[in-house]
């Protein structure tokens, strides 16, 4: 199947509009990382993964996705809605009292597409490793995908899971790091340098690929390569370079928009840079 890049670009633009509007409406949320990871989510849910929107929590016989850096819930919710897991109009309830679309994804309200509560960083790779190992045990030939943040690599549990996945040859697992170099308090190099993540994961026994996460053709090629290299004895890591705030010029490349909502004027400026392609919610 050939990717329809024009259509994927349109979905990306609309997703970015959803993100800034959702966060603005409640003056709360995390737009920076959400905007930076838009291409990844759109590629995954509109091209790469095989799944059923009639959501089955155990994920048997379908690809599964786990969001570890749960604060970027705006892009996750927009993606799930635009992919058909729930009505797009529900995006209006983001972060409101009684909403299924909480600030960090949660499972108690049964929101289709959400498999784990995430927000406490460092846990997603463990959950994904367990799900992928279960698939191997059950003879299920589908993949498990997980997205982590780069600042999240400062969590010890990440490295326990990385060791576990390699030791158990969980080779149907495709993990991705959003490598934007920013975290809530500043640049990752200033807060707690990550060193050479490629060499670290290689030394733990992983296969490592890298790509520009804001370049659709290159991202698709890398995700397809990851699938082709799977089931050969090693888990796969994609080191995905992105730009925080991508698509909105005044948000790009700075940690300051990690968790701040735009005001009315800033929202209008952002929307003027993002084409409405599929209709706003």
Image (tube, helix red, strand yellow):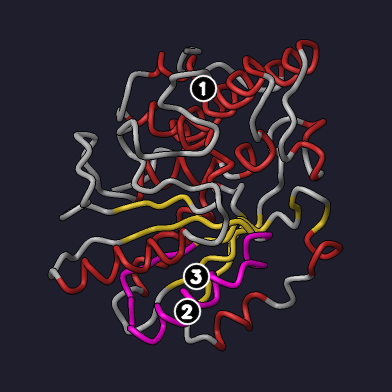
Task: Answer with mark 1 or mark 2, whichever residue precedes in sequence.
Answer: 1
Q: Secondary structure at mark 3?
A: strand
The residue singled out by tag 1 in the image is 94
Does residue 159 belong to the magenta stretch?
A: yes
At horizontal 61% and vertical 47% (from top left) the residue drawn is 214
1 or 2: mark nearer the eye: 1
Measured Cα–Cα span from mark 2 to mark 3: 6 Å
Instruction: Give percent across and percent down for residue 248.
Output: 73, 30
Say which mark, if any, is on residue 237.
3
User: Where residue 46 sits: x, y (%)?
Assistant: 37, 39
Q: Is residue 41 left or right of residue 167?
A: right
The image shows a total of numbered marks equal to 3
Q: Distance from label 1 to label 2 (Cα)?
A: 37 Å
Q: Can you tell which mark lies on residue 65?
A: none
For disc 1, the neighbor class at 10 Å (few under 14, some 14 to 19, many from 20) is many
- At label 3, counting other C-alpha atoms closer than 10 Å, the crowd grade (few under 14, some 14-19, many 20 or more) is many
Q: Is residue 60 above or below residue 170?
A: above
- Report if residue 205 lies within the magenta region: no
Query: Which stretch did the figure color magenta?
Result: 151-175
Query: Residue extending furthest left?
Result: 139
Q: Earlier in the sequence, mark 2 or mark 3?
A: 2
Pick whichever, 109 or 185, lies toward us: 109
Labelled disc at residue 207: 2
Q: Quadrant of residue 260?
A: top right
Specify whether 98 is left or right of 248: left
């Amino acid at each position: 199947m050939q990717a329809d890049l024009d259509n994927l670009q349109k979905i990306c633009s609309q997703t970015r509009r959803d993100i800034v509007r959702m966060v603005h409406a409640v003056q709360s949320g995390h737009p920076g990382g959400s905007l930076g990871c838009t291409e990844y989510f759109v590629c995954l849910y509109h091209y790469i993964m095989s799944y059923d929107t009639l959501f089955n929590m155990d994920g048997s016989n379908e690809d599964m996705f786990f969001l570890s850096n749960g604060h970027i819930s705006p892009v996750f919710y927009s993606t799930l809605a635009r992919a058909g897991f729930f009505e797009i109009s529900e995006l209006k309830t983001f972060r409101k009292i009684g909403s299924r679309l909480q600030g960090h994804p949660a499972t108690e309200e049964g929101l289709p597409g959400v498999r784990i509560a995430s927000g406490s960083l460092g846990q997603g790779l463990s959950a994904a490793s367990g799900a992928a190992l279960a698939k191997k045990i059950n003879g299920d030939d589908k993949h498990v995908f997980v997205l982590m943040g780069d600042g999240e690599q400062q969590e010890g549990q990440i490295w326990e899971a990385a060791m576990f996945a390699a030791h158990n040859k969980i080779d149907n697992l495709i993990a991705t790091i959003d490598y934007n170099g920013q975290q809530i308090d500043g640049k990752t190099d200033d807060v707690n340098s990550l060193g050479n993540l490629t060499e670290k994961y290689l030394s733990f026994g992983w296969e490592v690929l890298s790509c520009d996460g804001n370049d659709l053709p290159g991202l698709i090629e890398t995700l397809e390569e990851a699938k082709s290299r799977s089931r050969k004895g090693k888990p796969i890591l994609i080191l995905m370079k992105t730009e925080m705030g991508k698509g909105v010029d005044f948000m790009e490349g700075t940690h300051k928009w990690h968790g701040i909502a735009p005001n009315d004027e800033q929202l209008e400026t952002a929307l003027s840079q993002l084409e409405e392609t599929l209709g706003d919610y």
